[in-house]
Image (spheres, rainbow, N blue to C red):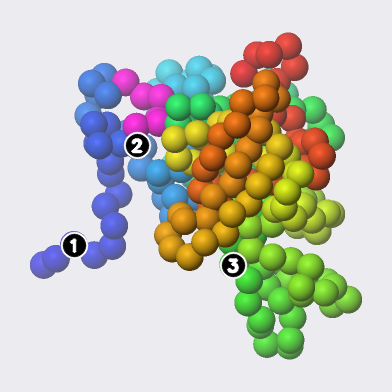
Amino acid sequence: MARRGQKKHLKRLPAPRHWPIKRKWGKFATRVIPGPHPKEHSLTLAILLREVLGHAENLREVKAILTEGQVSVDGRIRKDPRYPIGLMDIVEIKNSEEKYRLLPQKGGGLRLVAVDDAETKYKLCRIERKQMVPGGRLQLTLHDGRNILIPKDGNPSDYKTLDTLQVSLPDQKLMATIPLENGVYAVVTRGRNIGIEGKVLEIAKRFGTHASTVTIEDPEGNRFQTALDYVFAVGKRKSKVSLHSAGGAE
């Protein structure tokens, strides 16, 4: 009889290259369950607590921490060690009072940036798709799997694909909109220039897969060009979220 559904295990060798795990230390790794982020662009809570932060030495200790409700993601307690966390997610650890936001890392993968209490109350989400739903209201699908209805008095033309929304946590109320246009501050989330941040100088739209490009100037004055789909606006003039931890520690 054929197997039904996806595999429930993952070996360490074919695991995503950006995972900070020892490839030959063991045979298996924690597999990402279906959730808000795909496996290729996320980490599991087990990897975060064990390999990244060092709060646990094995999966048994990870499960003990999670079972106690010590870890929350975007304001909601998560207890599954395989739960995926990804771009712009807010992770809080109750006992140690640690608060982090996940951002793209140069060279690939994700990095943790320590944030204060004020920043844990909201996150930035990019609009991936939009559609009209019964009742004549516009529904926005965001990069982390959220579906949000715009206010009844809102103008659908004000929300465009690849624009960024500032969303409150955990109630998911719209706080602000950041259009992806010339002059905004943005970060590159994928591709060869992942992790680079700076001001958007030019957006060249063309037909074809990844044909549209964006020119970005970083704080040092260097210019880079990347695909439009890889750019994530984080502020109109400066970033609305901390892109670096205080004191430079990340």
3 or 1: tag closer to the N-terminus = 1
| Residue 19 painted magenta | yes
Disc assigned to residue 42: none
- Total labels drawn: 3
For the residue pair 201 and 8, the one nearer the viewer reads as 201
Q: Nearer the viewer, mark 2 or mark 1?
A: 2
Number of other residues with Cα within 10 Å of mark 1, as a class: few under 14, some 14 to 19, many 20 or more: few
Picture quadrant of residue 18: top left
Secondary structure of residue under mark 2: loop
Q: Nearer the viewer, mark 3 or mark 2?
A: 3
- Asked if residue 171 is positioned above or below residue 185 in the image, the reply reads below
* Picture residue at 83% right of the left edge, 54% below the top: 176
Q: Nearer the viewer, mark 3 or mark 1?
A: 3
**Residue 90 place in picture, x, y as percent:** 67, 38
Residue that label 1 marks = 3
CB within 8 Å, label 3 to label 1: no
Residue that label 3 marks = 129
Please give left or right for residue 82 compared with residue 71 in the image. left
**Residue 229 place in picture, x, y as percent:** 53, 52
For the residue pair 227 and 98, the one nearer the viewer reads as 227
- Asked if residue 186 is positioned above or below residue 149 in the image, the reply reads above
* Picture residue at 41% right of the left edge, 24% below the top: 20
Picture quadrant of residue 86: top right
Q: Which residues are magenta?
A: 17-22
- Asked if residue 230 is positioned above or below residue 147 in the image, the reply reads above
3 or 2: tag closer to the N-terminus = 2
Query: Hey, what amino acid is under mark 1?
Result: Arg
